[in-house]
């Protein structure tokens, strides 16, 4: 919470809306970060090669934000549902929203370029990981769904068949700066709440 976890509790009860930006860089345990970084290591080089490194950062950031926005909304308004996997996040962190965004960007690339291999492989991973989210407890399925949608639609806007431009680098640097500011502000404001 202090460093910038997102979800219904921080966003709606404490008005910490910027946590939808910081939560994608935080993790709940060493195992959590290990699994997430294995997926980032698997997917990020492919997205960077197809879109460019600046657009990779944009996709990661937008997907993370859209994932945590959807998760926070679901945690606030769907908390009454009897199935825990459909309630949304009360308190949530992790790179999986952004990972699903990278998968969404790869699915869009496959569709846009006509590469059925990229499209089907990324879609298969997304469906497999999505199914895993319903089997394992404590998985934030709304963050995954929102991240996938955010990654897919921002990839559509960025159009991978056109070369990366200088303004993409400026936007990517802005994304990184905003994320760093969100983590810093979360820490400062969170510590103030404690003392």
Image (spheres, rainbow, N blue to C red):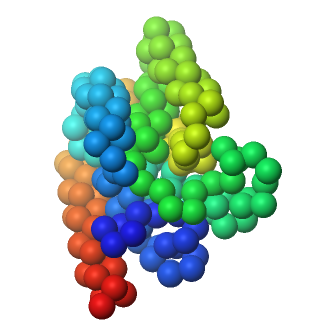
Q: Is residue 168 above or below residue 112?
A: below
Say whether residue 74 is left or right of residue 132.
right
Residue found at x 78% / y 60% = 80
Image quadrant containing the C terminus: bottom left
- Where is residue 17? Give x, y as percent: 47, 73
Q: Which one is nearer the viewer's eye here, 138 or 44?
A: 138
Q: Residue furthest top?
A: 117
Say whether residue 127 is left or right of residue 40.
right
Asked if one can make out residue 62 in the rendered structure from this viewpoint, the answer is no
Q: Number of marks in the image?
A: 0
- Where is residue 146? Give x, y as percent: 56, 47
Residue found at x 54% / y 17% = 124
- Where is residue 83? Give x, y as percent: 75, 46
Asked if one can make out residue 45 in the rendered structure from this viewpoint, the answer is yes
Residue found at x 60% / y 48% = 142
Say whether residue 75 is left or right of residue 96.
right
The answer to which quarter of the image holds residue 19 is bottom left
Q: Is residue 4 above or below residue 167?
A: below
Say whether residue 144 is left or right of residue 55.
right
Q: Which one is nearer the viewer's eye here, 89 or 61?
A: 89
Q: Is residue 70 above or below residue 99?
A: below
- Where is residue 128? Give x, y as percent: 56, 21
Image quadrant containing the N terminus: bottom left
Residue found at x 66% / y 44% = 85
The answer to which quarter of the image holds residue 145 is top right
Q: Which one is nearer the viewer's eye here, 140 or 30?
A: 30
């Amino acid at each position: 919470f202090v460093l910038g976890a997102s979800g219904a509790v921080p966003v709606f009860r404490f008005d910490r809306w910027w946590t939808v930006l910081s939560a994608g860089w935080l993790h709940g345990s060493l195992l959590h970060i290990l699994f997430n970084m294995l997926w980032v290591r698997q997917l990020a080089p492919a997205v960077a090669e197809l879109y460019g490194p600046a657009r990779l950062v944009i996709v990661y950031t937008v997907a993370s934000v859209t994932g945590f926005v959807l998760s926070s909304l679901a945690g606030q308004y769907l908390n009454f549902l009897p199935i825990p996997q459909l309630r949304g996040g009360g308190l949530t962190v992790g790179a999986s929203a952004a990972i699903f965004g990278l998968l969404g960007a790869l699915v869009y690339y496959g569709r846009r370029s006509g590469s059925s291999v990229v499209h089907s492989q990324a879609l298969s991973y997304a469906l497999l990981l999505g199914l895993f989210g319903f089997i394992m407890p404590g998985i934030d399925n709304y963050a995954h769904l929102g991240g996938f949608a955010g990654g897919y639609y921002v990839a559509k806007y960025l159009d991978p068949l056109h070369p990366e431009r200088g303004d993409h680098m400026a936007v990517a640097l802005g994304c990184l700066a905003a994320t760093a500011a969100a983590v810093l502000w979360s820490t400062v404001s969170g510590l103030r709440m404690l003392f």
